[in-house]
Amino acid sequence: MGASNFVEGVDLAFKIIIGISLFFLVGITTVMLWFVFRYSRKRHPVAEQMKDNNLLEITWITIPLILVLLMFYFGYVAFSPQRVVPKGALPITVIAKMWVWNFEYEGGKQSPVLVVPLKKAILLNLHSEDVIHSLYIPAFRIKEDVVPGKNNYMWFIPEQLGEYDILCTVYCGLRHSYMETKAKVVTEAEYQAWLSALPGKSNDPEGLVILRKNACTGCHSIDGTKIVSTSFRGLYGKTEKVMTNGSERSVTVDDVYIKSSVYEPDKDVVVGFQKGIMQTYKGKVSDDDLAKIIDYLKSIK
Amino acid sequence: MTEEKTHHPEPSYLVNTGKYKGLMSWLTSTDHKRIGIMYMYAMMVFFIVGVLLGEIMRLELFRPGQQFYGPQTYNGLFTIHGIIMIFTVVIPGLAAVFGNFSMPIMIGAKDVAFPRLNLFSFYLYILGAGIALTSQFLGNGPPDTGWTFYAPYSIQTHTNVVAAVFGAFVLGFSSILTGLNFIVTMHRMRAPGMTFFKMPLFPWSLYATAWIQVLATPIVGITLLMVVAERWFRIGFFDPSLGGDPVLYQHLFWIYSHPAVYIMILPAMGVITEIIPTFAQRKVFGYKAIAVSSLAIALVGYFVWAHHMYTSGMSPTARWIFSLLTFLVAVPSAIKVFNWVTTMYRGSIDLKPPFLFALGFIFLFMIGGMTGLTLGALATNVHVHDTAYVVAHFHYIVFGGVGFAFFAAIHYWYPKMFGRMYNFKRANWAFGFLFIGFNLLYFPQFIIGIQGMPRRYFDYLPQFTLGMQLSFFGGILLLIGIILMLTNLFSKKGAKAPDNPWGGRTYEWTIPSPPPLENFEVMPVMGPDETPYDYK
Ligand code: HEM
Ligand SMILES: [Cu+2]
Ligand SMILES: [Cu+2]
């Protein structure tokens, strides 16, 4: 039994297609090498010309045609249930954002890992805040693109307890290869306990929630480590060396500087970093939100 | 070069007869043979650059975690590697080099229909490639979108996408004009008596290819312009934050780029179809089936584009229809393999380097094609789509297929091109390194792909380390093979080549090596009982 309800069908399709292919690969290669050996110029100095043979040609059109239709069929039957969501499936909203996954449960509770109860149908509603991502859980054999402005979905039933990798497979920029998390399959009781212990939206400072929502924390840590860019810890009030229009200068990190960094990231670029990696948040982070962010940054000075 | 003059009354095309000397005499030449050779040298330079970029990626991937450079550099590397390899190497590919050099001779013509347009195509090619390369040095840094330029990332990223996109646009024009030129050439300039079904099969494959070039390329041209317009003027075609549809971009992109795979592979199949009869001294088996299957592939190939998009959120109906059509287009390719192998039956096989490369092609192409079946089926595609499995699959097709056919073609027509032979033993050694290196490089990628390793990943989970390291060593062997092959061909002059070193039957083997400027002293005529492959 596989880790999800789809594993068996998908793996069977793999076995059939790869099996038939291997048979032909080995067969044709052997025949070819045998001809090269048997009819080498040394052993067979004079070539014999042959007439075209219609029966032979019709045979080798028909047999591959039947085989590929068979392959199509097995691929189709294992796939088609993936698009039919059973009634009563547990809905979870996936929020993809450069380069973090978030899973939103009922009541707006969010978690960075996907925790699901064993043997229950799970419906993932896929939502992207920026570019296209793709949610891939190799152990479950499922994948669907997370397209901004489109409501894609996928579903599955987890069949085995355990922890499985979740990866992003549509290239989405700088930290695409780090856009990974885990799917945790737990018992129903554990799931309920986990869900009720999951903090609601309000526990964290508002500024931090906004930072997380916009995935700022994907590149800027709040604990002082370096991810892609400078950490937010201790940033406010610090003196930074920046490049402005090609010349170096020093600035003190204050409200004005933070605002310009969020809205026009390429204007002043901290020495040692490249232009063009951070995008503008104009129109995405309001002035109100910005004030809350600044409050939060002050608090982790 | 004077010694050739005494052998043949007409000077060879390599002798400068115009008003310029040296390089200028080449750059101003409208001779199809010289243009073919200029494409070959340009492509070799791009190919080597692309290979080195590939090796630099492999080096970084040797271990998980960051080794030598950061993710932004890696993302730029796979983008420019893909752009160079696809748009400047394999799309013009065999058609630009050997289509130009050999095809007019093989149909008994003095040149292509529009020689000056042909030279113009070459200049567009150089211009387009040049523009694409400036993307690396100008603007906000190298583009980081991948060669597919998927929206909305390609709209939003600050890197220099426009230069790369515009380069690809210009390269598209070069491709369209070459296709147009070849279509007219094959319609109007065949030797008297050579009906379409008496035309050799390499020209046949070019004919099918040319129609794709002419009909499909404009679509990607427009699409790329739309990307530029969207970046510059914020017109919402593809970016949902401007009101556009990102999946529409994928449709438009693949409506061209899937047929483009056939632009790459059909001429490769055509070359193999010439080489096998020559070295087996056997009339090609199933001439008509091979000719017609080229057209069938070109035609059905138009209707399978969305097999690149099974997970994009298309309707279930669209998914199964495209899957079904994809399987249908597999059949004509299978037919060709059966025909090639049967052509060897009861032949008299001379295992020279071009034939060896052709055998390598058949094997690698079969693996590429068969793994394409797992990608065509819905259930299996969903699992391996956008993983290392796809990276392995398309390298088996574009490198194992098109690349090895290209190597076979160089070894086949080299004596005709330069009037010189090369060292067979070294060519065989080079083949050994290339073949083993290639499989060691890409086969592990199938395995880690099935295990869930996504593509375009700068960093990876520790369970994939072994596969990545095997690939690295394969890459080194492959590089050695490439160096061995190129030095064997281009570092020193070999013995003088006879006019027909392999016992070929098509027209290029009836004229001197290297050919005179106008190819034929007496224009050939095909008699009613003659066929292009009259082996006794
Ligand atoms: C020594 C030879 C080569 C090596 C070592 C190599 C290596 C690579 C690597 C490491 C990647 C990136 C895969 C990823 O990040 O997922 C890649 C991608 C690619 N390669 Fe190659 N490659 C080689 C030759 C070729 C050739 C001959 C072609 C075509 C004719 C080619 C076409 C491509 C394309 C189209 C991509 C995809 C780029 C993208 O994802 O945007 N490569 N190659
Ligand atoms: Cu991603
Ligand atoms: Cu395709």
Image (cartoon, rainbow, N blue to C red):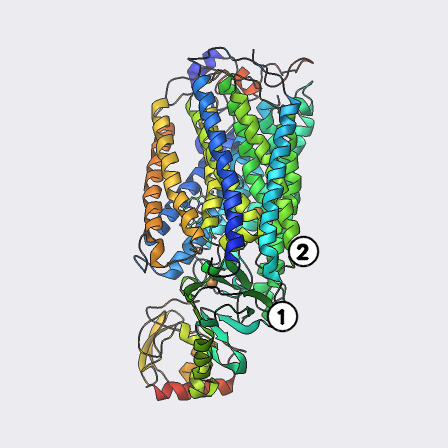
| Marks 2 and 1 in Cβ contact (< 8 Å) | no
Residue position for label 2: B317
Q: Is residue A182 above or below residue A60?
A: below
Q: Is mark 2 within 8 Å of ligand 3?
A: no
Tell which subunit mark 1 falls on: A
Q: Position of residue B354 (x, y in %)?
A: 45, 25
Q: Quadrant of residue B508?
A: top right
Q: Residue at x 53, y 46 (%)?
A: B374
Q: Nearer the viewer, residue B527 or B233?
A: B527
Residue position for label 1: A87
Q: Nearer the viewer, residue B37 or A42?
A: A42
Q: Residue at x 32, y 68 (%)?
A: A272
Q: Residues within 10 Å of mark 2 (few under 14, many from 20)?
A: few
Tell which subunit mark 2 falls on: B
Would residue B60 be found to the left or right of residue B358 on screen?
Answer: left
Q: Nearer the viewer, residue B276 or B216?
A: B276
Give the label, 2 or 1, closer to the camera: 1
Q: Quadrant of the C terminus of chain B?
A: top right
Q: Position of residue A61 (x, y in %)?
A: 63, 32
Q: Secondary structure at mark 1?
A: loop
Would residue B242 be found to the left or right of residue A265 on screen?
Answer: right
Q: Residue at x 51, y 21 (%)?
A: B344
What residue type is disc 1 on? Lys
What residue type is disc 2 on? Thr
Observer able to see residue B62: yes
Cα–Cα span, label 2 and label 1: 21 Å
Observer able to see residue B112: no
Q: Is mark 1 within 8 Å of ligand 2?
A: no
Q: Position of residue B531 (x, y in %)?
A: 63, 17
Would residue B339 be found to the left or right of residue B57 on screen?
Answer: right
Q: Residues within 10 Å of mark 1 (few under 14, many from 20)?
A: few
Q: Is residue A42 above or below residue A167?
A: above
